Image (tube, helix red, strand yellow):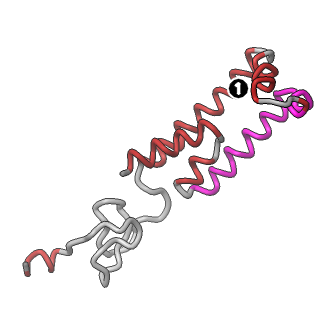
Amino acid sequence: MTWIRALAAAVLSLFLPGAGHALIRDWARALLFASVFALTVVLVLPFEDLLETGSVTEAMDVISSEPALSQFMLSFMLLFAALDAGFRAMSPPFGPTAAGDGPTCPHCGRELDTDLEFCHWCTTRVMYPDEEQES
């Protein structure tokens, strides 16, 4: 399931940088990528010409008539956002994980609530050592 989520995050980021990060609930990066992409579009592309276009094909013609550096900047931004979202979705969660003395989830690595029989972060069923010996 993780690779499907990573693929979905990467594809979403190809269409709109930040959308893939929002899918994996990395809100700070989603806002960062979306705002940097919007700023790049406003500064690099002829925004007035894009607003006057009536169809997607006309907008693509305006973008393709831009210098190679502008096209490279936009392509690089889209590719970087897609790769970052994909790799972040595949990696273990960042931030405070198992810093305590309690057991950790074998799937996501976060600290478990020993009163529950599953990880409340990723819903993976957990067998504690005491339960395994009794069975």
Q: Is residue 9 left or right of residue 127?
A: right
Up-down relation of residue 24 to residue 86 (above or below): below
In-front residue for pair 8/130: 8
Question: Viewed as shown, does residue 26 lie left or right of 93?
Answer: right
What is the x, y in percent for residue 108?
Answer: 36, 60
Q: Label 1, secondary structure: give it.
A: helix
Q: Where 101 falls versus 13 (above or below)? A: below
Which residue shows up at 78% across the image and 22% down it?
63
Residue placed under numbered mark 1 in the picture: 73
The quarter of the picture where the C terminus appears is bottom left
Q: Confirm whether the magenta stretch covers residue 21.
A: no
**Residue at position x 80%, y 18% from top?**
66
> Within 10 Å of the Cα at label 1, are there few (<14), some (14-19), or many (20+) other Cα atoms?
some
Q: Give the magenta part as a residue range.
A: 26-51
Taken as a whole, is the magenta stretch helix, strand or loop?
Answer: helix
Q: Work out whether 43 lies above or below 86.
A: above
